[in-house]
Image (tube, grey):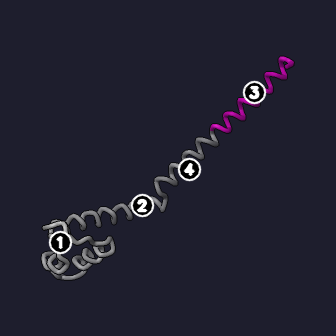
């Protein structure tokens, strides 16, 4: 197939093609002919589709937290712990200075 003959499908178009295959009794080969795509391409899109669906379900199970939010929360916890340690050290430093009369 030449570069000019290639069709580029949007994510929405790919979704609709996969949805059609899953919700109708039309054979995949006929759907592929209808949209001018190779059967192997269809199955690649379908694999990505199911992978995304699985990721979505797993995230839903764990809550709507993204990796970035979890990372930020962990950094905030670490930052607060370090502030507490610094406050404790500063307090101890003041106590020691008072004892030695500085």
Residue at 83% from the left image edge and 20% from the top image edge: 99
**Residue ranking furthest to the right:** 101
Q: Badge 4 local density, few (<14 within 10 Å), some, or many (20+)?
A: few
Residue under numbered circle 2: 59
Q: What residue is shown with label 4?
A: 73
As helix, strand or loop, the secondary structure at mark 1 comes to loop
Q: Secondary structure at mark 4?
A: helix
How far apart in space, not on screen, are marks 3 and 2 (Cα)? 45 Å
Query: In whole angstroms, how far apart are the C-alphas of marks 2 and 1?
Result: 39 Å
Which is more N-terminal, label 1 or label 2?
Answer: 1
- Answer whether labels 4 and 1 touch (C-beta < 8 Å): no
The answer for how far apart the CA atoms under marks 4 and 2 are is 17 Å
Percent from the top left, x then y, of residue 19? Answer: 27, 77
| Label 1, label 3: how far apart the Cα atoms are | 76 Å
**Discs 2/1, front:** 1
Q: Which residue is under mark 3?
A: 92
Q: Position of residue 47 (x, y in %)?
A: 24, 63
Q: Which span is picked out in magenta?
A: 82-102
Q: Is residue 95 above or below residue 63?
A: above
Does residue 86 belong to the magenta stretch?
Answer: yes
Image location (x, y in percent) of residue 83: 67, 38
Q: Kindly report the distance in space between the C-alpha atoms of the residues bearing marks 4 and 1.
A: 49 Å
Q: Nearer the viewer, mark 4 or mark 1?
A: 1
Residue under pointer 1: 5
Residue at 76% of width from left, 31% of height from top?
91
**Which mark sits nearer the N-terminus, 4 or 2?**
2
User: Would you place residue 79 above or below residue 20 in this image?
Assistant: above
Q: Main secondary structure of the magenta part?
A: helix
Residue at horizontal 63 percent and vertical 37 percent from the top? 82
Quarter of the picture containing the C terminus is top right
Q: Residue at x 86, y 18 (%)?
A: 101
């Amino acid at each position: 197939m030449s570069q000019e003959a290639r069709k580029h499908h949007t994510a929405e178009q790919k979704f609709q093609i996969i949805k059609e295959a899953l919700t109708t009794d039309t054979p995949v080969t006929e759907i592929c002919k209808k949209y001018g795509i190779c059967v192997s391409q269809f199955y690649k899109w379908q694999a990505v589709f199911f992978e995304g669906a699985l990721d979505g379900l797993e995230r839903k199970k764990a809550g709507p937290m993204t990796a970035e939010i979890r990372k930020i929360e962990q950094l905030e916890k670490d930052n607060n712990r370090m502030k507490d340690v610094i406050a404790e050290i500063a307090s101890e430093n003041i106590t020691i200075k008072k004892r030695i009369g500085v």
